[in-house]
Image (cartoon, grey):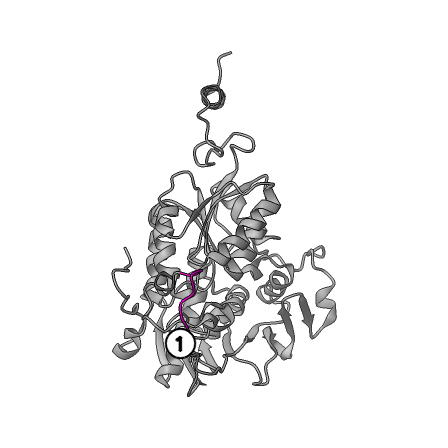
Amino acid sequence: MGQTTSSKQHSSRRSFIKSMLAAGTAPLFIPAHILKSETAPSNQITLGVVGVGAQGTWDMRAFLAYYKDVRVTAICDVNKKNITRAQKYIQDAYGNSDLKVFSDYRKLHADSSIDAVLMALPVHWHGIVSQDAILQGKHIYHEKPMALSLEEGRRIRDAVKKKGVVFQFGTQQRSSIYFRWACELALNGRLGKLKHINVCTSGGLQSELFERQPVPEFVDWDQWVGPAPMTAFNEKKLERKYHEHITNFSLGMISCWGVHHLDIAQWGNGTDVAGPSTVQGTGHFPKKGSCDAILDWKVHFAFPNAADVTFVSPKQGIKEGVTFVGESDNWVYCTRGVIKAGEPELLRDSQNKCGKMPIKLPVSNQHTQNFIDAIKTETSAICNVDTAMSSDILCQIALIAVQEGRKLQWDPKTECFVNDKAANQRLKHRTFRGNWTLA
């Protein structure tokens, strides 16, 4: 019997590799998108990491643990201290530091040997950098939030649809049994009819005015600021705990933390790819200091065919985390590492052995592994671009409702406010500095 097409292709690939080895021209790693069926290392996904600051390093180290499936072959950052730290982690993981180092993300994206990109930059870079990676055909692990504006998020989504790449959003709580369990209890009517969802996340930060400092040699400040308005350098602005509270670079915790728990509310409310009909809210902003993002807020979303959602910052009578409330005030509460219920017996059947929860959500036990599996099987990641956008939109319009100070009508189909020019203007992306632009 003759060889099957698959066998012929496999044999051809092996011959190709042998010939390259004999000629001494084989690359260190052959990208998985070229040789999908080969065993390691040729079947490893080659990963480039853009942004190796605090969050990027944390994510990268998660990928380093999956050395049989993924190889980090390139890193990019404009901060030399970040690069040095990342190189040490790679050295410790692989026994060598054989990788490419870039200071310009565009050069990393243009490298055809790279299959996927982990993007973990400050928020003001998210739209431009992710869109560029995707349009270069890279699968993308996109750290939250989507971007500084809804329009940038849409451009990312459009690029994913156009190129057909795998998109994983950095809302890692979808890979936690506690959050999935709470959502399944809500969706299966174990609380009775779902009446209300309370969401509370970290609030804003007040700071002193950061004084101008000389730009140190280890960072390219002009490149770090990139498309944002130029601002005086102060080393604190390089730290995530500060730049996520500065509006030149971020929307604040209403987005950076809010998207985590609002994403779980969406999951358990059955509104993953839906949206609210109205949004209204109040809040306060700092009157001085460099950290000028929203300090505290109370926002209410009404959904046409689902439970309404109250979204607040701390100290407003709602526990930090997500609480699903059903009929007769039966409830289930979840936060990281914790799940509680008003009726403890609800939590005695996590594996659904009694058959009372026919609705089962997708299972992911590790967010990084889920992204890897999605690439290898050419399927969707657990937090794909549609669910990412749906959750991120809630953060965007929550802030706009506070800024406008009035109840707003929202159309989920058009992703616009109804007959509201002023509010819709806030959905557009800001003017980018210099030559930075979206494709």
- Residue placed most toward the observer, 123 or 273: 123
Residue 234 in view (yes/no): yes
In the rendered image of this protein, does residue 242 appear above or below residue 222?
below
Whole-percent x, y for residue 137 in the image: 37, 44
Q: Quadrant of residue 404?
A: bottom left
- Residue placed most toward the observer, 310 or 206: 206
Q: Image point 46% across, 80% down: which residue?
A: 300
Badge 1 marks a residue whose secondary structure is loop
Residue 73 covered by magenta stretch:
no
Q: Image point 67% across, 68% down: which residue?
A: 339
Q: Which residues are magenta?
A: 213-219
- Residue placed most toward the observer, 98 or 205: 98
Whole-percent x, y for residue 162 in the image: 33, 48
Residue 369 in view (yes/no): no
Q: Quadrant of residue 430?
A: bottom left
Whole-percent x, y for residue 169 in the image: 48, 57
Q: Amino acid at mark 1?
A: Arg
What is the magenta segment's predominant secondary structure? loop
Neighbourhood count class around disc 1 (C-alpha, 10 Å): few under 14, some 14–19, many 20 upward: few
Q: Which residue is mark 1?
A: 212
- Residue placed most toward the observer, 97 or 33: 97
In the rendered image of this protein, does residue 288 appear above or below residue 412?
below
Which image quadrant: the C terminus?
bottom left
Say left or right for 272 vs 200: left
